[in-house]
Amino acid sequence: MYNTIKTELTDNIFFIYINRPDKMNALNAEVMKELALAIDEVYTNKEIKSAVITGKGEKAFVAGADISEFLALSDLQGAELAKKGQVIFKRIEDSPKPIIAAVNGFALGGGCELAMACHFRIAATHARFGQPEVNLGLIPGYGGTQRLTALVGKGKALEMMMTGDMIGAEDALAWGLVNYVVAPGDLLLKSTELLQKIHTKAPLAIARVIKCANAALDHISDGYEMELNEFGACFATKDMQEGAEAFIQKRVARFIGE
């Protein structure tokens, strides 16, 4: 089905591999198109409860965009390219099912932006992060200026974007860019463990947590108003009734997503 990515569904987790290891998994137009289709699967396939995005090979998660595609673009075409990227990455961010970036190497430029669009990030010890677009006379265009600032703070974000320097996994952890740093061999294991734990929770509540957390940063929605509305909506679900009864009865809740 895909030429530049590979997918597999295991225990309700949808693994999406960017599969251009000979090109450091760079994001070209075909990768972006196929990634968008894979994310559509996350939304529509009821067998999928969560997803992991990672890169094939040992060197790179995604080492950036395919710069060879940039040379012939006008300013308007450049803006259109950025718009397409932002739409795809926003769809990842807004997914009602959790999506983890398992960062198995370089996450630079568009790769760093892809990782930041996921709900959280787990990094291998050798992972490197950066927004080096200024080295090309560019700026991040797929949401990087916004998400990096939200995750690490304005000062650190500006330093990364203005110097173009990379940071290692431990600095990324200290700055709040990633949630965990693990040995490369444990990367998918840690991702799976976290998602399997989330799978035991009420899926409608998980989706509402994502929606409200995103509202805190979009500068448009009233996050507090959204929170009270989504909190109230939980009371109309069978899962809330089940969760409350299970708590009172001191048993494990059995959520059904209704």
Image (tube, rainbow, N blue to C red):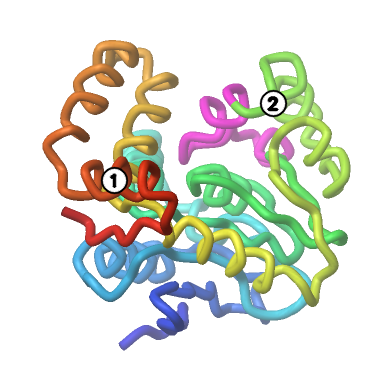
Instruction: Find numbered disc 2 in the image and state the secondary structure of the residue it sits on.
Output: helix
Residue at image coords 74%, 56%: 123
Residue type at the position of mark 2: Val
Residue at image coords 69%, 38%: 177
| The N terminus sits in image quarter | bottom left
Q: Is residue 50 something one can see in this rendering? A: yes
Give the camera-side residue of 11 and 128: 11
**Residue segment shown in magenta:** 133-150
What is the count of numbered marks?
2
Check residue 137 for magenta coloring.
yes
Image coordinates for residue 247, horizontal then vertical, percent: 39, 44
Q: Which residue is mark 1?
A: 245
Dot placed on the residue nearer the N-terminal end, 1 or 2: 2
Q: Determine which quarter of the picture holds residue 8.
A: bottom left
Q: Which mark is residue 50?
A: none
Position of residue 162 in the picture relative to residue 116 (left or right): right
Q: Which residue is mark 2?
A: 152
Check residue 22 for magenta coloring.
no
Q: Gap in Å between the C-alphas at discs 1 and 2?
A: 40 Å
Image coordinates for residue 48, horizontal then vertical, percent: 32, 71
Residue at image coords 68%, 65%: 190
